[in-house]
Amino acid sequence: MEVSSFVKMLGADFYTGVPDSQLKPLCSYLMNTYGIDKEHHIIAANEGNCTAIAAGYHLATGKVPVVYMQNSGEGNIINPVTSLLNDKVYAIPTIFVIGWRGEPGIHDEPQHIFQGEVTVKLLDDIGIDSFIVSKETTTDELENKMSEFKRLLNVGKDVAFIIRKGALQYNENIEYKNDNSMEREEVIKHIVKYSKDNPIVSTTGKASRELFEIREANNQGHQYDFLTVGSMGHSSSIALGVAINKPNKKVWCIDGDGAALMHLGAMAVIGNINPNNLVHIVINNEAHETVGGMPTVAKKTDLCGIADSCGYKKVASVYNYTDLDKILEEATNNNELTFIEIKCAIGSREDLGRPTTTAIENKENFMEFIKGVN
């Protein structure tokens, strides 16, 4: 189905969400139609955030908003859906459009498998009626379902369209880029060089895939790295838990701007605890690159200022490899909680692979390595 027909059927003029590769046709359509526009389209920090924005939109206009997201974000919407939107509370009608990763019977990455299994059940459990959209779904079927959904929306209930892979089509391309010159994979090579045999916790998406391939190219083991393949936004908290319990070992966290923004409160906790053996690196390409390249708000957000106000002791932002090497060398030698923002271009190798070890193998190898660390 053409995404324009889908959007017309929804009949909404305000969208907010977190980008998803499964919803790339919708995301591209919204960017080409509205861009980032406070009246029609806002990319939020996390799915709970956009659900609350949608609630505010309804309170101010009386209209029904649309929230789009990957199904991994269902966990983030449970609280605002059940304690804010629900018809037993404020009865705020909202249309959710959810990309179905890990659909049973469809091969996907390990972090999507269980979420895919419970996608529909979770919506049922929190009182959201849903309809699955596939390549075979006709316009008439969608219009009939939307007519049913409108009766639910009119009494303050929420509804969801679950989008299968390839269900939506959009033929216009959109190019995302910024003014930065450093490449993320090369940046990670520099980090690996300076981190030596210290543990690295890396964030969701291409950063972890690149780290895995760098170890392979270097003929190094993977035991040093915990690849946070799911749970976007939580790698810095995982690294904090490791750093607290291994105080004599330098712990490195490779984070992304979209991930850091998703649960920004983690930085306040890290700064308050102040582990002097933690190096928190945010590779900032101002984009949700792994799911298509849509922009984050990190271009206009002073991440270093946030880190400083949260209590990080050493804070720096770098734009070139010379300064990068300098600050990484300093980080290896100091005993201070360190935050490094690395300004990076958007892009990755077309032949970038995925980890060949399972998530369980990654965990067990990392834990075995950590066990031998004083």
Image (cartoon, rainbow, N blue to C red):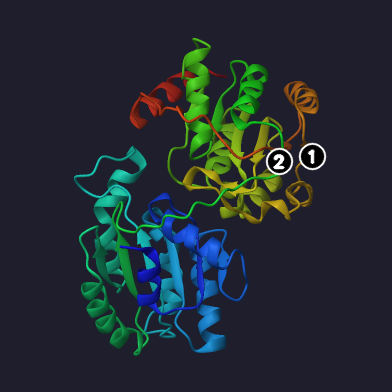
Q: Position of residue 346 (x, y in %)?
A: 61, 40
Q: Quadrant of the C terminus?
A: top right
Q: Position of residue 66 (x, y in %)?
A: 44, 73
Q: Position of residue 247 (x, y in %)?
A: 63, 28
Asked if the residue at tag 1 contacts the one at tag 2, i.e. Cβ–Cβ closer than 8 Å, the answer is yes
The kind of secondary structure element at disc 2 is loop
How many other residues sit within 10 Å of disc 1, few (<14), some (14-19) or many (≥20)? some
Mark 2 or mark 1: name the one nearer the start of the chain: 2
Extreme residue toward the front, this view: 171
Residue 244 visible somewhere in the drawing: yes
Q: What residue would you read off at disc 2?
A: 274
The kind of secondary structure element at disc 1 is loop
How many other residues sit within 10 Å of disc 2, few (<14), some (14-19) or many (≥20)? some
Front residue of 260/144: it is 144
**Label of residue 313 in the image:** 1
Q: Position of residue 236 (x, y in %)?
A: 58, 41
Front residue of 310/227: it is 227
Q: Three-letter amino acid code at disc 1?
A: Lys
Q: Give the distance between the C-alpha atoms of the residues marked 2 and 1, in whole angstroms.
A: 8 Å
Residue 49 visible somewhere in the drawing: no
- Where 87 falls versus 20 (above or below)? below
Q: Three-letter amino acid code at disc 2?
A: Asn
Residue drawn at point x = 48 percent, y = 39 percent: 205
Q: How many marks?
A: 2
Camera-nearest label, 2 or 1 = 1
